[in-house]
Image (cartoon, grey):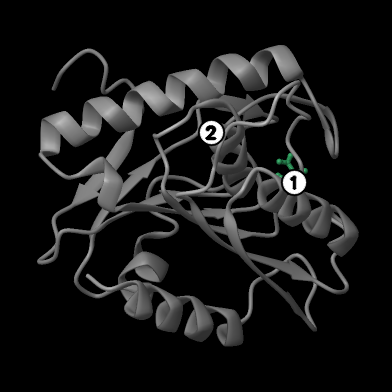
């Protein structure tokens, strides 16, 4: 394993050109989203890293000072670190980065959004489940080739739907093609959205 593959992770080969980058929420791990990834796309390869930050023993992708208040310096560093890992993993496992789809939940969706806003060209497609604006960039990157499917829970008390909408608006302002959805749900995910994501992925093609 190359030294840049420095996230604990799982890689499950697939039978199509697509790779799903699975990014768990606080307290998750590299195993947690594998079944969901398989359900969303039975043919895709799956790359699932574990966040390196521990908060009271719970793994996350970056540090926070309080709920919804992020350590922006750490976020910046962890965003770059994860982006480098993804590029190294693509070289190591020989998958096409441009065919990769990030699927992030909560903290995982927030770091995916941070990669979109900070690292041009790493993510072309992202599914952001219960996400918020991770940081406000000084200058928006050109995201006109990027597609995002984003979902909030109308009763989510951890990430208010208005915060998810703010992120959708920001990504759209950067030129991304954004499809935003709000469900009768809290922070937990619903089957309804899995079905919709799966359909959306099918429509994007293999
Ligand atoms: C975050 O810290 O990224 C969000 O508050 C969501 C969470 O992980 O609870």
Q: Nearer the viewer, residue 104 or 54?
A: 104
Say which residue appears at 23% left-offset and 32% top-offset. 89
Give the labeled residue for mark 2: 115
Give the labeled residue for mark 1: 170
Q: Quadrant of the N terminus?
A: top left
Instruction: For mark 2, give the secondary structure.
Output: helix
| Mark 2 or 1, nearer chain start | 2
Q: Quadrant of residue 153?
A: bottom right
Q: Quadrant of residue 113?
A: top right
Q: Quadrant of residue 198?
A: bottom left
x, y percent for residue 6: 32, 20
The residue carrying pointer 2 sits among few (fewer than 14), some (14 to 19) or many (20 or more) residues within 10 Å by Cα, namely: many
Going by the image, does 88 lie left or right of 28?
A: left
Say which residue appears at 44% left-offset and 27% top-offset. 82
Instruction: For mark 1, give the secondary structure.
Output: helix
Q: Nearer the viewer, residue 11 or 31?
A: 11
Q: Is mark 1 within 8 Å of ligand 1?
A: no
């Amino acid at each position: 394993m190359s030294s840049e593959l420095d996230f604990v992770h799982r890689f499950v080969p697939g039978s199509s050109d697509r790779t799903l980058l699975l990014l768990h929420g606080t307290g998750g791990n590299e195993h947690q989203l594998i079944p969901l990834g398989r359900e969303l796309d039975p043919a895709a390869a799956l790359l699932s890293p574990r966040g390196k930050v521990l908060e009271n023993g719970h793994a996350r992708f970056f540090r926070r000072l309080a709920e919804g208040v992020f350590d922006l310096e750490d976020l910046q560093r962890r965003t770059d670190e994860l982006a480098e890992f993804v590029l190294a993993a693509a070289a190591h496992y020989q998958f096409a980065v441009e065919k990769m789809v990030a699927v992030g939940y909560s903290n995982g969706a927030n770091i995916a959004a941070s990669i979109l806003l900070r690292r041009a060209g790493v993510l072309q497609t992202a599914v952001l489940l219960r996400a918020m604006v991770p940081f406000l960039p000084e200058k928006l990157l050109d995201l006109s080739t990027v597609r995002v499917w984003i979902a909030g829970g109308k009763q989510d008390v951890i990430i208010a739907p208005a915060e998810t909408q703010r992120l959708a608006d920001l990504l759209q302002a950067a030129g991304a093609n954004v499809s935003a959805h709000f469900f009768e749900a809290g922070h937990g995910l619903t089957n309804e959205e899995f079905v919709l994501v799966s359909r959306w992925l099918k429509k994007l093609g293999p």
